[in-house]
Image (cartoon, rainbow, N blue to C red):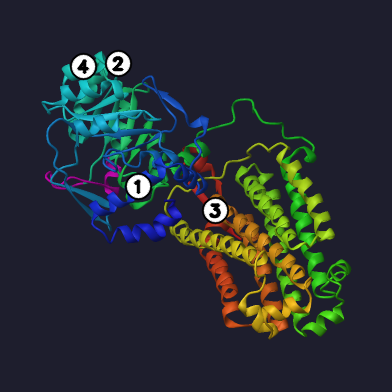
């Protein structure tokens, strides 16, 4: 459930349901995806956050692969932790856990204030449920909240100590509980709020606490606690005061009101070592941990160690981007050549030799047959030109700049295109020119796969706020994802016709003929047309995959080169397709609607994502001082 789908489709739909039902549905679906084999691959393909080793840190002898944790109130039953971990979760909080029977609270969403009300009290997890949840080992540390005034807390600690890394004591100071936790070799964290802040100094003096969980709360009635955006100022203030009083050593985990990446980053800069997100995942989306991690990588991680990658100065032929660039150039030039042939001769000498039909013979069979073949070959050339432009941008601006997603996009898309070469062989037609070009281009692909990937250059500055440009871009990204997926489906359908019936009903209506008449006129005519159809289907499939993967992984602020490539390549493809259909008169409404919808979807996506992708963000002097402020340069 990436942000581009959650913010645009799922959140409005889920907000129409009761909060309890919405949470159950959302986490049940995500939990199933996280546990299933195919679901994990879907999450990975849809843009999960690959944790960087440089995010790893150690606090209180515990290793955290990410500074962002999952708060206990979001998913008390941990039904989706495996899926959420793919988005950058470094540790998990569970609880409060109690051995007494548990009554679930009623949840009320206050959407305008971005707050969640828990009535009459926050949700608690039963000891039995906690034992069941913790049977399977977790990939990240688990910290359990327990209540100091709960008489069953001793039992909870005894039962769960062997399955978790630490306990968070809430609601008071109990040295016996602290001693009990430490006897089980678990870490002790004290929950700190405004009303318990005076206890901080006492615990810091005795050094019996491994760390503190500092939490701000929204102003609300005691019987109906709220968590949400308005608690963030209090959380920030408490973190700053706590760090000032206890010094730099004890671990501080901050939680409360983290609804934007800048909130989490500012807490980390103000003294927190780790942050816990809860209500922010409801209102901002599951991508919030990922965006906070990107902020940490962008601002905090510096290349102060020798690079393990290749030095900058190497021969271009040693780098993968050089060969994928040649692949894009070859595809673009091939598209130009195919277009020139299509608008002049239409058929080449070897086409005539294979079919035994000259241009005059083809016109004699059907006076619209050459127009139909011209329509097929121009649309093929248009697709090659559009995909060539996208490959050129992904190679020169993407892969060469250290964006390895761009390299994966080209390799995946190109492989599909090369495999489509074999589709039309079943009809017995062998295109020698096509085979020659394919053999040369495949060598570029093979060399790209065996060459070096360039080192990552400057990390793009992350989004610190959920501003209007970013929110509009979520719709633009959604439309581009749908656009790419639609082209993939269209490519598969066209390939299917290309290797079976070849013609569709609209084709036969345009030529005012029937399938039997075409086959009876010349048995070699069908393979000739099938060759164009199968090739066009394969190129459409490759283009759709390139657009889909670019939309999933490349929609980042400042990536104006990607915006230009997608818009330029897509527009050229659609304009040439419209032109040839109008030229030959193949303008049936049913046949043209997909083209009109495609160009409308492309440009709507482009308009919505323009300011987000084409705004260059750079570090100002003020940003260099505190790591937060950004300025916006010219819009392109």
Q: How far apart are marks 2 and 4 (CA)?
A: 9 Å
Image-quadrant location for residue 356: bottom right
Label 3 vs 2, first from the N-terminus: 2
Where residue 447 appears, as percent x and y from the top left, is 76, 41
Q: Magenta segment, which residues?
A: 219-234
Where residue 492 appears, as percent x and y from the top left, is 60, 61
Q: Which of 536 and 13 is in front in this view?
A: 536
* Contact? badges 2 and 4 (CB < 8 Å): no
- For disc 3, the marked residue is 555
Where residue 88 appears, as percent x and y from the top left, is 44, 39
Q: Which of 241 and 587 is in front in this view?
A: 587
Q: What element carries label 3?
A: loop
Left or right of 230 in this view: 628: right
Q: How far apart are marks 2 and 1 (CA)?
A: 32 Å
Label 4 vs 3, first from the N-terminus: 4
Left or right of 62 in this view: 413: right
- For disc 4, the marked residue is 180
- For disc 1, the marked residue is 281
Q: Distance between the residues labelled 1 and 3?
A: 20 Å
Label 1 vs 3, first from the N-terminus: 1
Q: Is mark 1 on a helix, strand or loop?
A: helix
**Residue 362 is inside the magenta segment:** no
Label 2 vs 1, first from the N-terminus: 2
Label 1 vs 4, first from the N-terminus: 4
**Residue 221 is inside the magenta segment:** yes
Does 376 appear above or below 195?
A: below
Image-quadrant location for residue 386: bottom right
């Amino acid at each position: 459930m990436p942000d581009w789908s959650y913010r645009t489709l799922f959140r409005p739909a889920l907000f129409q349901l009761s909060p309890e039902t919405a949470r159950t549905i959302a986490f049940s679906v995500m939990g199933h995806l996280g546990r299933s084999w195919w679901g994990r691959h879907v999450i990975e393909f849809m843009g999960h956050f690959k944790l960087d080793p440089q995010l790893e840190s150690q606090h209180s002898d515990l290793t955290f692969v990410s500074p962002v944790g999952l708060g206990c109130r979001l998913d008390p039953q941990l039904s989706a932790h495996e899926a959420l971990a793919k988005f950058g979760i470094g540790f998990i909080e569970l609880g409060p856990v109690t051995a007494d029977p548990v009554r679930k609270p009623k949840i009320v969403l206050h959407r305008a204030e971005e707050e969640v009300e828990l009535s009459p009290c926050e949700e608690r997890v039963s000891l039995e449920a906690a034992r069941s949840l913790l049977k399977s080992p977790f990939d990240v540390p688990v910290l359990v909240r327990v209540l100091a005034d709960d008489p069953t807390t001793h039992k909870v600690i005894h039962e769960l100590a062997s399955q978790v890394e630490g306990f968070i004591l809430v609601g008071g100071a109990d040295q016996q509980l602290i001693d009990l936790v430490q006897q089980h070799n678990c870490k002790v964290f004290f929950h700190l709020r405004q009303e318990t802040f005076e206890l901080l100094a006492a615990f810091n003096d005795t050094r019996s606490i491994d760390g503190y969980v500092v939490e701000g709360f929204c102003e609300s009635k005691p019987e109906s606690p709220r968590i949400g955006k308005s608690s963030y100022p209090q959380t920030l203030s408490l973190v700053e005061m706590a760090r000032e009083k206890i010094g730099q050593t004890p671990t501080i985990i901050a939680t409360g009101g983290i609804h934007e990446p800048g909130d989490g980053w500012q807490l980390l800069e103000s003294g927190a070592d780790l942050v816990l997100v809860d209500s922010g995942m409801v209102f901002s989306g599951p991508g919030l941990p990922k965006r906070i991690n990107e902020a940490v990588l962008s601002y905090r991680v510096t290349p102060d160690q020798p690079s393990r990658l290749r030095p900058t100065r190497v021969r271009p032929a040693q780098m993968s981007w050089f060969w994928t660039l040649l692949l894009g150039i070859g595809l673009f030039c091939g598209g130009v050549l195919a277009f020139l042939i299509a608008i002049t001769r239409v058929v080449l000498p070897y086409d005539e030799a294979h079919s035994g039909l000259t241009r005059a013979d083809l016109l004699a069979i059907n006076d619209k047959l050459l127009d139909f073949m011209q329509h097929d070959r121009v649309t093929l050339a248009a697709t090659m030109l559009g995909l060539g432009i996208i490959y050129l941008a992904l190679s020169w601006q993407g892969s060469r700049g250290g964006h390895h997603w761009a390299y994966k996009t080209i390799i995946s898309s190109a492989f599909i295109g090369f495999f489509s070469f074999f589709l039309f062989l079943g009809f017995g037609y062998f295109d020698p020119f096509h085979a020659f070009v394919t053999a040369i281009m495949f060598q570029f692909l093979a060399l790209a796969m065996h060459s070096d990937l360039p080192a990552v250059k400057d990390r793009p500055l992350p989004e610190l706020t959920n501003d209007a440009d970013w929110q509009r871009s979520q719709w633009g990204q959604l439309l581009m994802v749908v656009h790419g997926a639609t082209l993939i489906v269209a490519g598969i359908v066209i390939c299917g016709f290309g290797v079976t019936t070849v013609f569709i009903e609209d084709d036969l209506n345009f030529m005012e003929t029937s399938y039997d008449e075409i086959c009876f006129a010349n048995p070699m005519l069908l393979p000739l047309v099938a060759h164009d159809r199968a090739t066009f289907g394969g190129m459409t499939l490759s283009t759709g995959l390139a657009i889909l993967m670019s939309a999933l992984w490349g929609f980042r602020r400042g990536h104006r080169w990607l915006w230009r490539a997608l818009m330029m390549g897509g527009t050229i493809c659609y304009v040439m397709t419209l032109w040839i259909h109008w030229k030959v008169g193949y303008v049936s409404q049913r046949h043209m609607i997909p083209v009109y919808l495609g160009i409308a979807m492309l440009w709507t996506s482009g308009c919505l994502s323009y300011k987000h992708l084409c705004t260059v963000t750079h570090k100002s002097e003020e940003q260099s001082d505190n790591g937060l402020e950004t300025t916006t340069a010219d819009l392109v």
